[in-house]
Amino acid sequence: MTEQAEIGIFGGTGVYDAGLLSESKEITVETPFGKISDSITVGVYKGRKVAFMPRHGKKHTIPPHLINFRANIWAFKEMGVKRVIAPSAVGSLRQDLKPGDFVLPSQFIDFTKSRKYTFFEDAKVIHISVADPFCPDLQNAVSNAAKTINLHLKKDATYVCIEG
């Protein structure tokens, strides 16, 4: 049986280390979509089982357009992950957003062209709503945590994803 975790974190640029986890061990998960980005560190943080995977690999060798997102997400699904946190280092066209600002998006637009968009490649037709693409419980938890540490968090932004 695959190691289980409640929360999954996809580390991005600048987030490679799962050093906050206690009782940690590294595992790998086989998927029908190929190899995952790197081994997954599973451990405990404040009593919760957490899985951490650096999506660019531990040595930051996988560029964004070559990340096997389906394999990575499938691995977390196999581990029983119910909540996914995926911080991203991004740029902005808005002058009021400065380097170092934290933004909590409420919507996204996907302008990528080369990614696989589905897990369902057989005769199934599956529809999901993306009217509210982000988990409201997780959004509230992030917002409350930001308040607790006096971190100014910009909300109601739209994340626009492009190739690489």
Image (cartoon, rainbow, N blue to C red):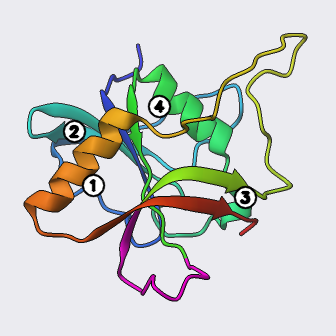
Q: Which mark is residue 18?
A: 1
Choose the circle earlier in sequence order: 2 or 4.
2
Q: Residue at x 72, y 58 (%)?
A: 66
Over which residues does the magenta segment extend? 91-103
Distance between mark 4 and mark 1 Cα atoms? 16 Å
Label 2 sits on a secondary structure element that is strand
Distance between mark 2 and mark 3 Cα atoms? 27 Å
Q: Which residue is mark 4?
A: 76
Q: Residues within 10 Å of mark 1 (few under 14, many from 20)?
A: some
Under mark 2, the amino acid is: Gly
Choose the circle earlier in sequence order: 4 or 1.
1
Under mark 1, the amino acid is: Ala
Decide whether residue 79 is among the magenta residues: no
Q: Residue at x 32, y 39 (%)?
A: 138
Q: Which residue is mark 3?
A: 66
Q: Residue at x 25, y 52 (%)?
A: 143
Q: Which mark is residue 50?
A: none
Distance between mark 1 and mark 2 Cα atoms? 9 Å
Distance between mark 2 and mark 4 Cα atoms? 14 Å
Residue lying farthest to the right in this orientation: 123
Choose the circle earlier in sequence order: 2 or 3.
2
